[in-house]
Image (cartoon, rainbow, N blue to C red):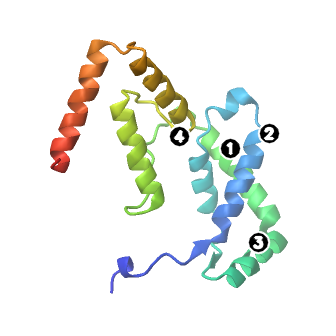
Amino acid sequence: MTSANYPKTYRNVMEVLVVKEVERQLKQLPANLARYIEPSQVITFALNHLPPLYASSEEGWQQQCHRAEQDLQEKIQTVVRQSFAAIQRDPLRSSTPLPPPEGTEERIAHNALNALQELLLQGDLTWNTMVETVRQTLVQAMEGELTQAQTEKITRRQRKRDRYRGL
């Protein structure tokens, strides 16, 4: 039996607690420093230095949360602080983030954002900027402000995508 046969009904409580702590400490950093920090790198570094606390039920989740808050809160804070220090040592290090696992809502959203980036010719599109970018592009299209080159490029990409999908 493969892992694909098991629905994901287990989660690591430590992931949630570390994310909260990273967000808390990130807010305390000066803005000019915080913009150079990739939170996922800090989170990953910290999780690799903390014990996992998995749960597969609501009761187990509550028990693991209680255990972490009682026994590990100080360690979480310390490890996250150390993680920021480790990541800051090499601020120019670049990395390509892993895509979410296939079939997950996150992967579907990731693929949708990539498709919008291509369609709207916006390589730096994020979910935070997507709504405004789509709005601006639609307004430009309605007001005839898109250049002929932009319109042709969007049309070519859409036709190519449609051919690929067999439409």
Residue shown at 38%/63% (left/top)?
103
CA gap, disc 4 to disc 3? 32 Å
CA gap, disc 3 to disc 2? 23 Å
* Amino acid type indicated by mark 2: Gln
* Amino acid type indicated by mark 1: Ala
Q: Which one is in front in this view, the residue at disc 4 or the one at disc 1?
A: 4
Q: Which mark is residue 68?
A: 3
Which residue of the protein is positioned furthest toward the front in this rendering?
A: 142
Work out whether 45 lies above or below 90.
Answer: below
* Amino acid type indicated by mark 4: Trp
Work out whether 38 lies above or below 76.
Answer: above
Q: Quadrant of residue 44?
A: bottom right
Q: Which element carries disc 4, helix, strand or loop?
A: helix
CA gap, disc 3 to disc 1? 23 Å
Q: Quadrant of residue 132?
A: top right
CA gap, disc 1 to disc 2? 14 Å
Residue shown at 77%/48% (left/top)?
24
For disc 2, the marked residue is 28
Which residue of the protein is positioned furthest toward the bottom in this rendering?
A: 1
Residue shown at 62%/49% (left/top)?
42
For disc 1, the marked residue is 85
Q: Which one is in front in this view, the residue at disc 2 or the one at disc 4?
A: 4
